[in-house]
Amino acid sequence: MKYCRFQRHGQAQYGLVEPFAGHDLITRLLVTPPEEAGGDVESLRTRRIDQIAFGDAQLLPPMQPSKIVCVGRNYREHAAELGHEVPQQPLLFFKPPSALLSPGGTVLRPKISQRVDYEGELGVVMGKTCYQPAAEEDVRTYILGYTCVNDVTARDLQNKDGQWARAKGFDTSCPVGPLVTDEIDPWTGIGVETRVNGTVRQQGNTHDFIFALDVIIRHIAQVMTLFPGDLIATGTPAGVGPVVAGDVVEVSVEGVGTLRNVIADQGAGTSIVDS
Ligand code: MG
């Protein structure tokens, strides 16, 4: 099943996305948010609406996470390109929910940064509360579905600060979407590609993960509760690079679709004061 979250009659609603004659359409609303299905999305009640072309919908981030947990350096070649060792255990950091950006939204480069990079990634949406799952449990049952994430990073602030909160947490630094699907299996290998102005810059596959998704989820849930709707960004392949105002960044995950965002510079009057 594929679903999105979108603006309809001034309200945020979840919609089922279904293919019809070669086009994706929103044909039904999900009456309860999919995060509240307790992992059983097929049981969700839906309501028929006049169909909307998916491409015409005013999309929103397809989840409302309590937190966004990100994995750094989960592809060997990416760790190498930044001059880092391959980590011995998953390297975790957060992006705040205030960093979320809708599909089609504009990434605003902070005034205090001279270098902002794209990082295309597979996103995982949790479907059930997960804390210290038993060793024999299949952690896949906690997953609601998958999406595309751009872990936009102010690389100069990341190097300068030590902590990554500013570098990876600024407003608009977490574009996500355009939809969530449970119809892919990252354990079998899913392609992740990033394009800037149509030119391919990153081409990875989840079978090259240093840490498999179940290892990542267990590692996180060993110390903190993952709630339904929480988002995990699973790390970026090699090929990261800077973007400037006017660039169009597209992150495609095989079987999910394409997350497309434009880059702009933060305008006058909205400056974040450096300190
Ligand atoms: Mg990243």
Image: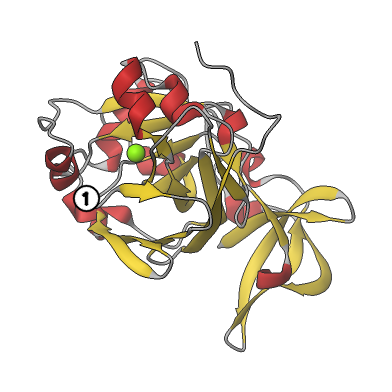
- Could you say where residue 73 lies in the image, as x and y percent from the top left? 23, 36
Judge from the rendering whether residue 217 lies leftward or rightward of residue 50; answer left or right: left
Helix, strand or loop status at disc 1: loop
Q: Say whether residue 26 is visible.
A: no
Residue at 11% x, 33% y is 86
Kindly give the residue lying farthest to the bottom in the view shown. Answer: 21
Work out whether 110 lies above or below 178.
above
Quarter of the image holding residue 103? bottom right
**Between 61 and 154, which is closer to the camera in this rendering?**
154
- Could you say where residue 119 lies in the image, as x and y percent from the top left? 36, 46
Q: Say whether residue 60 is visible.
A: yes
- Could you say where residue 167 lies in the image, as x and y percent from the top left? 42, 27
Residue at 34% x, 57% y is 185
Residue at 58% x, 26% y is 66
**Between 171 and 68, which is closer to the camera in this rendering?**
171
Judge from the rendering whether residue 81 lies leftward or rightward of residue 255; answer left or right: left
Quadrant for ligand 1? Answer: top left
Provide the residue designation for mark 1. 238
Q: How many numbered dots are placed on residues in this image?
A: 1
Quarter of the image holding residue 39? top right
Quarter of the image holding residue 23? bottom right
- Could you say where residue 1 lies in the image, as x and y percent from the top left? 55, 63
Q: Amino acid at mark 1?
A: Ala
Work out whether 96 lies above or below 52.
above
